[in-house]
């Protein structure tokens, strides 16, 4: 799991060497309608920086299907080269686990949490690594997916 995390001094590859970063994180993103790419970028980068996580460790972005055509989210995913996967409210609502509930989000989407639930839905047997963080109408959570590496 060490290679998901950044250490700018220690993780600089030596000349001719490469660094393998497994794409083992699923990012769940929630946002208000009309959220701009810059708002999404700001929280995403802040969460990665605060937790010393490489962006390359993010396998995909997940959200609720209400956001599948949200321009800011689509642009954010395209600019980062990360796949967007969405789920309907019923699928998210039926997930087992403890999630950070929001009455406002429930009223708007029909499910009490988008970021944590969608990240869990996008994983194979993951666990929440970074719980819901919010800023400027955007929420993000990260789930560590089950990883199997073979050579």
Image (cartoon, rainbow, N blue to C red):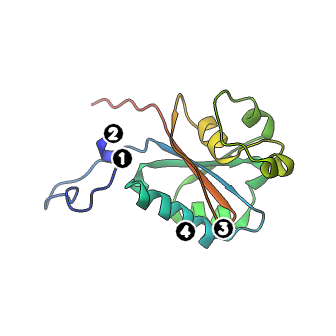
Q: Which mark is residue 145?
A: none
Q: Quadrant of residue 37?
A: bottom right
Q: What SS does tag 3 mark?
A: loop
Q: Looking at this view, name the residue that lies furthest to the left.
A: 15
Q: Residues within 10 Å of mark 2 (few under 14, many from 20)?
A: few
Q: CA distance from mark 1 to mark 4?
A: 20 Å
Image quarter hosting the C terminus: top left
Query: Between disc 4 and disc 2, whose residue precedes?
Result: 2
Q: Position of residue 55 (x, y in %)?
A: 43, 56
Query: Between disc 1 and disc 4, whose residue precedes?
Result: 1
How many discs mark residues in the rendered view? 4
| Position of residue 108 in the picture relative to residue 42 (left or right) | right
Query: Between disc 3 and disc 1, whose residue precedes?
Result: 1
Depicted 139 relative to depicted 35: above or below: above
Q: CA distance from mark 2 to mark 3?
A: 31 Å
Q: What SS does tag 2 mark?
A: loop
Decide: marks 3, 4 in contact (CB < 8 A)?
Answer: yes
Decide: marks 1, 4 in contact (CB < 8 A)?
Answer: no
Q: CA distance from mark 3 to mark 1?
A: 26 Å
Decide: marks 1, 2 in contact (CB < 8 A)?
Answer: yes
Q: Which mark is residue 42?
A: 4
Q: State the residue position of label 2.
A: 1
Depicted 124 relative to depicted 66: above or below: above
Q: State the residue position of label 3.
A: 136
Q: State the residue position of label 1.
A: 4
């Amino acid at each position: 799991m060490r290679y998901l995390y950044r250490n700018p001094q220690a993780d600089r590859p030596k000349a001719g060497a490469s660094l393998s970063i497994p794409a083992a994180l699923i990012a769940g993103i929630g946002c208000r309608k009309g959220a701009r790419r810059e708002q999404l970028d700001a929280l995403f980068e802040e969460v990665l920086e605060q937790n010393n996580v490489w962006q390359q460790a993010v396998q995909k972005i997940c959200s609720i299907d209400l956001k599948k055509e949200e321009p800011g989210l689509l642009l954010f995913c395209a600019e980062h080269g990360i796949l967007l996967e969405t789920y309907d409210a019923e699928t998210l609502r039926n997930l087992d686990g403890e999630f950070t509930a929001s009455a406002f989000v429930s009223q708007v989407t029909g499910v009490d949490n988008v970021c944590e639930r969608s990240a869990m839905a996008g994983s194979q047997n993951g666990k929440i690594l970074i719980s819901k963080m919010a800023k400027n109408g955007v929420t993000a959570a990260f789930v560590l997916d089950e990883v199997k590496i073979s050579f």
